[in-house]
Image (cartoon, rainbow, N blue to C red):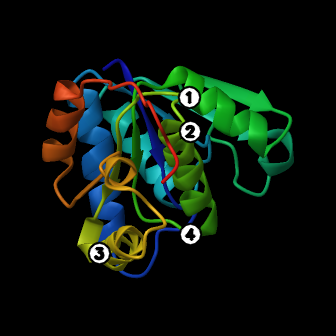
């Protein structure tokens, strides 16, 4: 596990808890010698993760679309920053550079990124581990809904098992290290 892509918000959310969890994750990744790949911004949880990983001596690679350079305020102290044309190129580049995916709390963009890489895994386009960091119980209701998708027959158990949800990033990274890629024989049903 050389690098992990971290999807997260361009906001810090309500209260200080999400920021603390993001900083702890950035520090943990750096301490384990795992580089961070993320959206390239200096604001919100994105900036918190990047700053913490950098402060702990870690590698941090940003990928930001040209049109978001000012909106998300591109981070100027990263190990490397890729400026791409659009959101599609951003996600493709982040996936290319990463060996796994973690999602901290975030909004619609975070969920969109998460669901896209999950769909890619479901279709057999990659076999990289994917997890949600359930910081402060943020993803608890989403986990319940994902289980509901299985109960209602819109998601099979194998596809459900592609996503791990846990509040403990140490446990998630340990699971990433043990991850064995399994070929997808059939994605529908």
Residue at mark 1: 125
The N terminus lies in which quarter of the figure? top left
> What residue is drawn where x is 59% and y is 31%?
94
Mark nearest the camera among 2 and 3 is 2
Identify the mark at residue 120; answer none if there is no mark: 2
**Sequence-earlier tag: 4 or 1:** 4
Q: Position of residue 162 (x, y in %)?
A: 35, 45
Circle 3 packing at 10 Å, graded few (<14), some (14-19), many (20+), is: some
**Sequence-earlier tag: 1 or 2:** 2
Residue at mark 3: 140
Side of 63 relative to 2 (left or right) = right
Q: Is residue 118 above or below residue 138?
A: above
Local secondary structure at mark 2: helix
**Sequence-earlier tag: 2 or 4:** 4
Q: CA distance from mark 4 to mark 3?
A: 15 Å
Query: How many badges with numbers are in the image?
Result: 4
Mark nearest the camera among 4 and 1 is 1
Circle 1 packing at 10 Å, graded few (<14), some (14-19), many (20+), is: few
Q: Position of residue 61 (x, y in %)?
A: 54, 27
Q: CA distance from mark 1 to mark 2?
A: 5 Å
Q: CA distance from mark 1 to mark 3?
A: 27 Å
Q: CA distance from mark 4 to mark 1?
A: 25 Å
Mark nearest the camera among 1 and 3 is 1
Residue at mark 4: 107
Local secondary structure at mark 4: loop
Side of 10 relative to 182 (left or right) = right
Q: Position of residue 13 (x, y in %)?
A: 46, 75
Q: Position of residue 166 (x, y in %)?
A: 21, 58
């Amino acid at each position: 596990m050389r690098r992990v892509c971290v999807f997260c918000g361009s906001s810090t959310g309500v209260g200080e808890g999400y920021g603390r969890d993001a900083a702890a994750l950035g520090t943990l990744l750096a301490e384990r010698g795992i580089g961070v790949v993320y959206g390239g911004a200096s604001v919100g949880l994105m900036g918190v993760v990047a700053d913490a990983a950098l402060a702990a001596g870690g590698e941090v690679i940003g990928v930001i679309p040209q049109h978001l350079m000012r909106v998300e305020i591109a981070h100027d102290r990263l190990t490397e920053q890729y400026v791409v044309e659009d959101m599609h190129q951003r996600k493709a580049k982040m996936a290319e550079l990463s060996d796994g995916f973690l999602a901290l709390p975030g909004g619609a963009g975070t969920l969109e990124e998460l669901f896209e890489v999950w769909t890619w895994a479901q279709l057999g386009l990659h076999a990289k581990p994917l997890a949600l960091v359930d910081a402060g119980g943020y993803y608890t209701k989403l986990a319940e809904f994902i289980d509901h998708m299985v109960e209602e027959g819109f998601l099979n158990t194998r596809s459900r098992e592609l996503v791990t949800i846990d509040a403990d990033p140490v446990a998630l990274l340990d699971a990433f290290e043990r991850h064995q890629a399994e070929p997808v024989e059939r994605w529908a049903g």
